[in-house]
Image: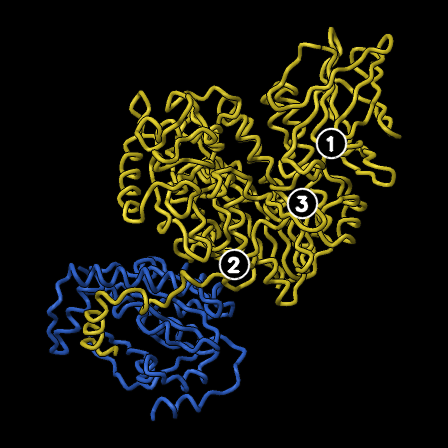
Chain colours: A yellow, B blue
Amino acid sequence: MRSVLIGFDSFDPNIYETLAAQGKMPNLSTLAGETGYSRLKVSAPPQTEVSWTSIATGADPGTHGIFDFVHRDPSSYLPYVSILPTKVSAVGEQFVPPYTAKTMFSEAADMGFPATALWWPALFPARLEVPISTIPGLGTPDVRGQLGVGTFATTDPQEKKDKTRVSLLTKLGEGKYSGFLEGPMTKTGKEIHPARLEFALDVLDDGQAVLRIGSTELPLKLGSWSSIFEVKFKLGLFFNVTAITQAILTQTRGKIGLYFLPLQIHPLHSTWHYGAPKSFLKETWNQAGPFLTLGWPQDTTALEEGCITDEQFIALCENIFESRKRVFYHQLSKFKEGVLAGIFDSLDRVQHMFLRGREDLAHGWYLKLDQFVGEARDKIETLGGKHRLLVMSDHGFSLYKHKVHLNRWLSENGYLKFKDGGSDISKVDWSQTSAYALGLNSIYLNVKGREGQGSLNPDQIEPMLAELKSKLMQLHSQDGEQAVSNVLMKHEAFSGTYVRLGPDLVVGYAPNFRASAETGLGKAPEPIIEANHDHWGADHCIDADAVPGVLFANRDVANIPEVSFRDIPFLMINKHLDQSHLKPPSEQGRQGQGNIEERLKGLGYL
Amino acid sequence: MLKKFFLKEKKDKPKQKIIVVSGLPRSGTSMMMKMLSEGGVSIVTDSEREADEDNPNGYFEIELSKKLREGVVGWIYDAPGKAVKVISYLLEFLPADLTYDIIFMDREIPEILASQKKMLERRNEVSTISDEEMTQQFQSHLKAVKYWVARQPNMRVLFVKYDQVVSDPAKLAASLVDFLEKPLNTEAMKAVPSQSLYRNRA
């Protein structure tokens, strides 16, 4: 077995087919041939972490247990990030794998083949008990154990950012400044505070500076990203934490601006099980060069908050793509057998930020990825022998013109009652609440015996689901555009052991609509539907049928009817991990079978 | 008894694949068998069902294939490297420890029904099921079979449209060579689906 999977996060079939028809996708079109391309049915909801996990397991969230980016604790209603769960043990709070279902990687390893998964979401922390070589993707935290925000160092005392940390630069002399970075938390006496690391910045002229941090001295050029460098935080007498980051000098005239990417785990000096095995990480880092490790390394927050410009963000995306290509090609050069998969997600970030407004720029990335496929195929061919190649995406993309504040809708329709003038999940009158929204596609009923302060009896559940579904399908924007194109009840969307933990309704927004970020965290700003003027102008967390993915293969995929995420393990390792959808035809309902048999007997075929 | 007898006949798992031609009756399976035969593929047939007006070139069948559901499978262990006709209704009963290249014939259901009707008449059989009902039931049967067959680890499938066979037999012959990964006499194959065989159109 020798199977290679190249994953392009958010590669959209509509855009591909348009560009291919214009002759702009020569490498993918060649791979597609007449039968090597299909649109891919993706799992609901079409969120990155849900979708790639469904692809890896060949199963829907009811089987792997990742239903949404945000889950909730039903007893307290508190939201948490589904792909970064922790467990308190004797050695303190530890990250634990977000799911335990079998993947095509673990199955390949069980079959005795080497398996390598690069930047696959929800694979942090490494599962040491399974011999898979991993560099984890989405869901990998920063060095503080969080999803990661950067630091903007400035001489402007008035500077304020919503999420980004601001560090005031102190002027030491002409062109000389000092500042500090805040790292992991540490304890001094009884006080818990972030460890600090001082740095010095010498601005040489309008276009150049030198950054000195720890033992590192880095030349900086205005508007260009530095190389990846290490920073070391002292957390105790014998305990240091080494992180990696990149910096960019953004302003030198009037005031100084210096931005640092979130402090990221150093793969060779991680206090957590970042990837596995260590020898694999070391060899990759040393041979293929350094790479950013944060689960979401393309810093969209820095762009949204004005810390960096569009062009600087794009340059960062390109750097990340290039470093991943280096690592992928390095692994490819050593690939003899088994499974090798790599996810490339810069396209997703570029589309979020530019599909609305700079469509050509986003489309340019499709051409870039097409060229990459050509290069990768050439390298695979040089390995000789037979191989399987899949190039695929986890979902497509759509414009995001309207934010839906779903909790506001629930509130105004009498399903959610706030108290004390509140407008978020922490101020709810649960005794008068029958439903609440958390996450980007999830609605939960407030069920007695399940939720901490449940109000609905079991006999009220089905009618309430039907009522909500019906009303949501009638939700329209002010100009009459339908906001929701599909609502799935739990049993329609999911199957498997964990169904009971999933949301009661999966809301499939129509293209152009999406739940607001506030909804994701249980907030309820007004009005119900608000125009989206954010830089983040396109998205995919909508109706799964509206954003199918793509599947290209060097084998016949057009002869697989209704090809979906469930089929990927089969295509990669020739084995289904979840057989629930594979009942033989004679067991799929007997209606009409008697008539067919009668006909076949009449014709002499039975 | 019969089942036990044939099950006993099982032999070691052969390495060569079995070529299976499948589909609904009257979807062009016999024509495909004839093409394969002309192409140089050995056919598994007992010639029990003789050529007639419905299949002037013969049926290319083996009666035992109709007993797959009853577990009569021993005969197929002699079929690797050869082609055998198995209707879509019985595909799921093929032994799971063998591997198959399946050529699945697809034809417009109204054409199939029209052809089946004529065949039923010639066999003096009377159908009480309406065309609408039969269409719906065949459609859902085909959907389920195609979904299932395309996902079996021991099966590869090529769906072949009947009218494309007739309109471009040369292209089909070439795609069969690709799919079966073996040299075939494509010149002889492309002569088979003559327009004269394209009968019983609705």
Residue A35 pos. (x, y %): 45, 53
Q: Which residue is mark 1?
A: A192
Question: The disc numbered 1 marks a residue on which chain?
Answer: A
Going by the numbered disc 2, the residue's amino acid type is Leu
Q: Which residue is mark 3?
A: A93
Q: Secondary structure at mark 1?
A: strand
Near-viewer residue (A31 or A562): A562
Residue A65 pos. (x, y %): 50, 51
Q: Residue at x 10, y 69 (%)?
A: B128
Label annotation for residue A379: none
Q: Earlier in the sequence, mark 3 or mark 2?
A: 3
Question: The disc numbered 3 marks a residue on which chain?
Answer: A
Q: Which residue is mark 2?
A: A571
Question: What is the quadrant of the N terminus of chain B in the image?
Answer: bottom left
**3 and 2 marks on the same chain:** yes
Residues at circles 3 and 2 in contact by the CB criterion of under 8 Å: no
Q: Nearer the viewer, mark 1 or mark 2?
A: 1
Q: Secondary structure at mark 3?
A: strand
Q: Residue at x 53, y 22 (%)?
A: A535
What is the crowding at mark 1: few (fewer than 14 residues within 10 Å), some, or many (at least 20)?
Answer: few
Q: Confirm whether residue B183 shows in the render.
A: yes
- Cα distance, mark 3 to mark 2? 38 Å
